[in-house]
Image: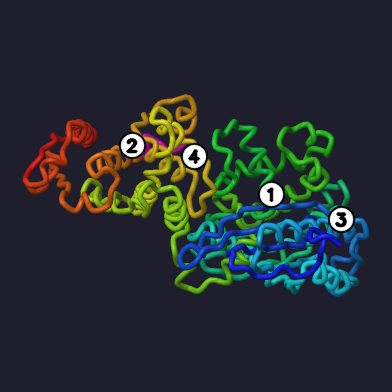
Amino acid sequence: MSSFDSQEPPQPNGSGLKAVVDIGSNSVRMVVFKVGDGDQARVPVPISNERALCGLGRGFGPGREQEGQGFRLDPHGVRSAILHLRRFVSIGRKLGVESWHVLATEAVRSADDGDEFVARVEKIIGAPVSVLSGDEEAEASALGVISGIPDANGMMGDLGGGSLEIVALNRGDIGQQTTLPLGVLRLDAIVGRDMAKARTLVDKALSQVDWLGDVVGRNFYPVGGAWRAFAGLHMAHTDYPLHVIHGYSLSRQEALDVLRLVANLGPESLGQIPGISKSRLSTLPLAAVVMEGLLARANPARVIFSAHGLREGWLYKQLGESERARDPLVIGCADWAGRVSRFGGTSEFMGHWIDPLFPGEDPAYTRVRRAAAMLSEICWRDHPDYRADGSFSRVLHMSFSGISHPERIMLAFAVSARYGGEVSGSFKDQVAPLIGEYALDHAMLIGRALQFANTLSGGVDGILENANLELSHKELTLRLPEEHAYLISDICQQRLSGLARRLGRQSVIAH
C-alpha cells in the first residue's frame, strides 16, 4: 500500500493546521484551517475546502420524524461518504494537518446503523467522531455566526438535510434554542413537491416554538448552503455588484420575495437560473418554504447571511473568553499586514497618529480606520500605477469576518485613497451608492490622511514620534521640532495642503 493510500492516523507536526470534518445528512465536508497562536487563533484561515453531496439522510421517510424512530443510512450515500472521506484524509495528510475534529449530525445521530458508520469513519481518519446532539449542533452553529458577526442580535437558523436548528442571539450571547425535524431531505421524503403540504408541516412545527416572538424587529442569520443560495440568487436578480455572501443583508420583504419565487418554481425552471447548483435543485423549494415560515413567525426586520457556521463555531468554542472577545476584523487585518508589510509590523501607528483629524468619530468608523491603517501597505509590491485600483479590488473581496458590506466598501475606498485613488472608476461607481455620500467622504478622508502619514514617515515606525497633527476651527497644523524640519519634503507639503482642503482648513507647518 502506498503512503498516499495508507490509513494510519495522521501525526501531529506543529503545523497549526486543523481539519474540521462535518458529516451532515446531505453533505460531507472538510475544511482545513490555519490556526495561529495567541490573538491569531481568533481568526482561523481556511486554506482547503472539500465538499461532496452524499445524501446520507436520503433514508428519512414519512413518520420517522418522530423521536425514537430511526432509519438506515442511504447505502449509496455511505459509499460516497467513505470514498470522499478517504480523499479528505489523503489531502489532509499531505497538507500536514495537526489535529482532526470530526463532527456528525442528524443523519448519523438518528440512524439505526449510525454506530457502525462511525466506527468505519474513525478507522479511516484515525480520530474520534463527535456525534453531536441537537443542542450541541445548534450551539456550534450559533457560535459560528457569532465568530463572524460578534454583535449578532436576533436568531440563527441552520438548515441541514435532517434537521433545522434555531437559536436566539442576544448581541453575541446565546439564548434559547430548538431543534426541529425540518431538514430538506426529511421534508422531501414526506411531502415530495407538495409545497402546500410542506407549508402546513413547517407551520405546525414552528407553532410549537414559543420564543420566536422575541425575534420581532431584530435580525435573522441563515446558515447552510441551501439558504446561502438564496443570497446568490438575489444578488444575480438585482445585479448587486459585491458578490460576497458573508454579511449580505436583505429586508424581510426582499427575502420573502425571493423565497416565494423559488418555492413556486420546479427543479426544471430553477435549473435555468445561473449560479444555482444542480445538486440542490430538488431541495431548494423546500428550503425556501422553511425560511418563509420562520420569517412569518419570527418577523425579523432583516436577514443577514453568514458564511460561518458549524465548523467555525466548533473552533470558536475551543477559545478562551479573552480570545473570543478579540475583534475578528482587527485581528484578521493584523495577520494580513504582518505577512505583506514592507518593514514588518502592521502600520497601526499611522492610524493612531491621524486621530486628531477625527474628533467625535463614530466608533464603527474608527474601527474601519484602524483596519485601513493596517492594510495601508497591502500593495507596495505592485506597480505604482496599479496600486490604487489593485488595493480597492483586493480589500473589497478579501475573506474578512466581523465586517458588514457597507464597512467593507468603506475600507476598500480608504485603502485605495491611501494610494491616491479617486472616488470614480468603472467598478467604484457601482459600489459607491451602497454606502452613501457621508460614509464615502469619510473613507476618502481616512485614505488621504494615511497617504500623508505614509509620505511623511516613509512608512517607517518611529518617524512620526517627532511630529503631530492639530485640528482647529480654521487650520490643520503639522507641528514638529525645528531640528526635524528636514522631514517635510515638497510632496509632504502638497499632500498636507490637499488634506487641509478636504477638511475645509488652511494648512500650517509650525515648529
Residue 211 in sight:
no
Disc 4 and disc 2: Cα gap in Å? Answer: 17 Å
Residue drawn at x 52%, y 63% as measured from the top left: 36
Along the line of sight, the residue nearer the viewer: 322 or 58: 322
Please tell me whether residue 349 is drawn above or below residue 251 in the rendered image.
below
Please tell me which residue is depicted at 49% across the width and 36% down the height of the picture: 393
Query: In this rendering, would 3 be left or right of 258?
Result: right
Would residue 171 be counted in the magenta stretch?
no
Residue 444, numbered label: 2
Three-letter amino acid code at disc 2?
A: Met
**What span is in magenta?**
434-442
- Kindly state the secondary structure of the residue where label 4 is placed: helix
Q: Secondary structure at mark 2?
A: helix
Q: Which residue is mark 1?
A: 227
Between marks 3 and 4, how big is the CA–CA gap?
A: 37 Å
Binning the other alpha carbons within 10 Å of mark 4 as few (below 14), some (14 to 19) or many (20 upward) gives some
In the rendered image, residue 123, in percent from the top left (x then y), is placed at 82, 71
Q: Position of residue 361 (x, y in %)?
A: 29, 50
Q: Check residue 394 in the rendering and tell me which mark sits there, or answer none.
A: 4
- Marks 3 and 2, how far apart at CA: 52 Å
Confirm whether residue 444 shows in the render: yes
The residue at which mark 3 appears reads as 80
Residue 115 percent across, percent down from the top left: 86, 74
Amino acid type for the residue under numbered disc 1: Trp
